[in-house]
Amino acid sequence: MSKQKPILTSGRIDRDSTRQGERGFTLVEMLVVIAIIGLIMGLVGPRVLSYLSESKVKAAKIQMRSFASALDLFQLDTGRYPSTAEGLTALVQRTSGAPNWNGPYLKGGMVPNDPWSHPYIYRAPGEHDAYDILSYGSDGQEGGSGTAGDISLEKLTSAASNEQ
């Protein structure tokens, strides 16, 4: 059997004869697929966003511990911690009051911002220790709760000692 050739009608191919057996999606089928995708995103989306928020908090904690290690190295070399005015920048740039500075103490030659693109807050002396390192969380404002809550190095070290 030979295939039937398309019929030419006034110089154009008759589309009906070439699409025998072909069938596209109907509007109803497309709407059902879109509704199912929307339902899945509605159920899975909040969970994914929650994991992203939690990972930013964990990243801030890791960076703060890295700063603490760098500050300890700075203190071993210079005999003191950077002042509040010098800030964490003293870990990557020599300051006039640190003759035995042997840095940079952080890789990359710059102090990274927190995961929400806000600068970390450094205070020396700190409220309960030689220094405080803080992140104000996602909102960049003091206080708050959840991912907008403050993260401090003091909270990290006390939480670590409670776990042991």
Image: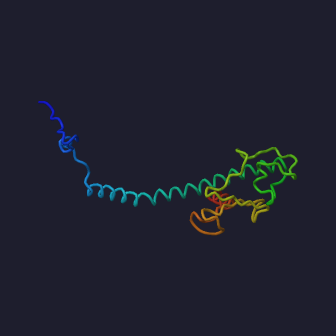
Image check: 151 left or right of 15?
right
Q: Foreground residue, 61 or 103?
A: 103
Q: What is the tally of numbered marks visible in this picture?
A: 0
Query: Furthest-front residue in view?
Result: 10
The quarter of the displayed image where residue 129 is located = bottom right
Image height check: is 14 above or below 82? above
Q: Foreground residue, 115 or 100?
A: 115
Q: Quadrant of the C terminus?
A: bottom right
Residue plotted at (26% across, 58% down): 28
Image check: 12 left or right of 134?
left
- Where's residue 83, x and y in %? 81, 58
- Where's residue 41, x and y in %? 40, 57
Q: Foreground residue, 100 or 112?
A: 112
Image height check: is 34 above or below 108? below
Query: Furthest-top residue in view?
Result: 1
Q: Quadrant of the N terminus?
A: top left
Query: Furthest-bottom residue in view?
Result: 143
- Where's residue 52, x and y in %? 52, 56
Residue plotted at (77% across, 45% down): 104
The quarter of the displayed image where residue 138 is located = bottom right
Query: Furthest-left residue in view?
Result: 1
- Where's residue 77, x and y in %? 83, 47
Image check: 121 left or right of 27?
right
Image check: 149 left or right of 85?
left
Q: Foreground residue, 26 or 81?
A: 26
